[in-house]
């Protein structure tokens, strides 16, 4: 699908192909997999124990959409932020020719900022290395990794840092969505942009709540490092500090969530749906995006 998106940290979505394999606890409630199961039926999503799944290349007409966006952006001076939402750009199960075609498209659309989010950070350097026969990424990309818990951060953040140092993208970002536990940067490096989000129900998968302390911890670490903080959503659950004010009819939708921080009391969360839980953290909408260098020299008129 290629359209204006409801994702708060992007302007449009464009997926050159569809299909992926679940490789993380963050994938348990994958909206793209649910979309394939219920509406699109283009591919079989991969899962551990069930194989890689299948991949499907989008049509030539669909591939021309970013070229139109690029022309429009050149005329208006806008810089649309585009996210490939139904695939992983660094998926080695995808034919190399598809990946190279996508690189060529990004290079041909310098008026677009491409947000390349991956759960396969270990593939990025080798799949962008001309010495390995790959195509180097153009300059109009930002690269991000998904981190849902401390174990993923400890394992994969050094990979994102190396990508930042060696490829020098416009910026690097971390998608902490769904946030499933406390994440401590341990006083070390952090991405330029920290995007946080709770989980939503996807078919049979019921959303897991996100403790407010986990979100505040990432916010405070972002502030201390002068990183940009963005709260996408709370998901299905929100904090219920005063359980007594909720009617008996919804008390079965409460859930206790431990903070994993000594001295911090557990939170009681109530399941109300993402339209009601909103995006406020302590009364504030955190909607910021990183500033990017002027890109006029790379515009195609």
Image (tube, rainbow, N blue to C red):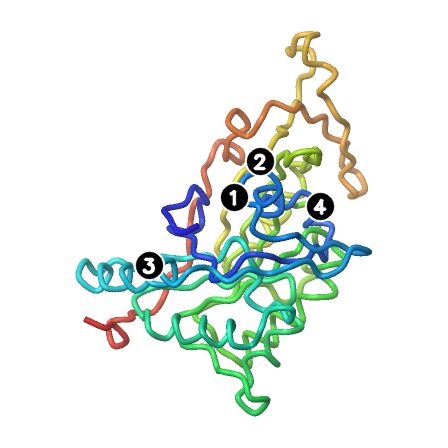
Report whether 15 appears left or right of 19.
left
- Give the CA separation, mark 2 to mark 3: 32 Å
Query: Which element is circle 4 on?
Result: loop
Furthest toward the top, the residue is: 248
| Mark 4 → mark 3, Cα distance in angstroms | 31 Å
Q: Which residue is mark 3?
A: 65
Dot 3 crowding, Cα within 10 Å, few <14, some 14–19, many 20+ = few
Which residue is rendered at x = 54% and y = 80% of the image?
128
> CB under 8 Å between callouts 2 and 3?
no
Q: Nearer the viewer, residue 134 or 207?
A: 134
Foreground disc of the pair 2, 3: 3
Q: Which residue is mark 4?
A: 28
Query: Mark 1 = which residue?
Result: 231
- Give the answer, above or below, for where 175 lies relative to 266: below
State which mark lies toward you, 1 or 3. 3
Q: What label does residue 234 carry, if any?
A: 2
Foreground disc of the pair 4, 2: 4
Q: Which of the 4 quarters of the picture holds residue 203?
A: top right
Using the image, determine if residue 62 lies above or below residue 205: below
CA–CA distance between discs 4 and 2? 17 Å
Q: Determine the CA span between mark 2 and mark 1.
A: 8 Å
Give the mark nearer the N terminus: 4 vs 2: 4
Mark 2 lies on a secondary structure that is loop
Q: In the image, what residue occupies the spot 38% across and 63% down?
A: 60
Q: Is residue 264 above or below residue 160?
A: above
């Amino acid at each position: 699908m290629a359209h204006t998106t409801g994702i708060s940290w992007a302007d449009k979505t464009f997926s050159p192909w569809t299909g992926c394999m679940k490789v993380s606890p963050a994938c348990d409630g994958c909206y793209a997999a649910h979309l394939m199961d219920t509406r699109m039926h283009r591919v079989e999503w991969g899962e551990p124990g069930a194989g890689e799944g299948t991949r499907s290349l989008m049509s030539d007409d669909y591939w021309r959409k970013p070229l139109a966006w690029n022309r429009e952006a050149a005329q208006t001076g806008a810089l649309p932020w585009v996210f490939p939402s139904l695939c992983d750009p660094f998926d080695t199960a995808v034919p190399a020719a598809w990946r190279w075609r996508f690189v060529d498209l990004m290079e041909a659309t310098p008026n677009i900022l491409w947000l390349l989010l991956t759960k396969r950070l270990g593939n990025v350097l080798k799949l962008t290395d001309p010495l390995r026969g790959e195509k180097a990424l153009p300059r109009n990309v930002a690269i991000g990794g998904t981190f849902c818990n401390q174990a993923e951060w400890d394992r994969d953040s050094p990979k994102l840092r190396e990508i930042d140092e060696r490829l020098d993208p416009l910026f690097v970002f971390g998608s902490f969505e769904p946030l499933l536990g406390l994440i401590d940067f341990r006083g070390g490096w952090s991405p330029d942009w920290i995007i946080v989000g709770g989980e939503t129900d996807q078919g049979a998968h019921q959303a897991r709540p996100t403790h407010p302390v986990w979100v505040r911890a990432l916010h405070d670490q972002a502030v201390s490092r002068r990183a940009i903080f963005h709260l996408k959503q709370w998901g299905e659950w929100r904090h219920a500090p005063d359980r007594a004010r909720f009617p008996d009819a919804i008390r079965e939708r409460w859930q206790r969530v431990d903070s994993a921080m000594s001295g911090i009391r557990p939170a009681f969360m109530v399941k109300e749906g993402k339209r009601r839980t909103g995006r406020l953290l302590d009364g504030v909408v955190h909607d910021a995006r990183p500033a990017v260098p002027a890109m006029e020299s790379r515009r195609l008129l």
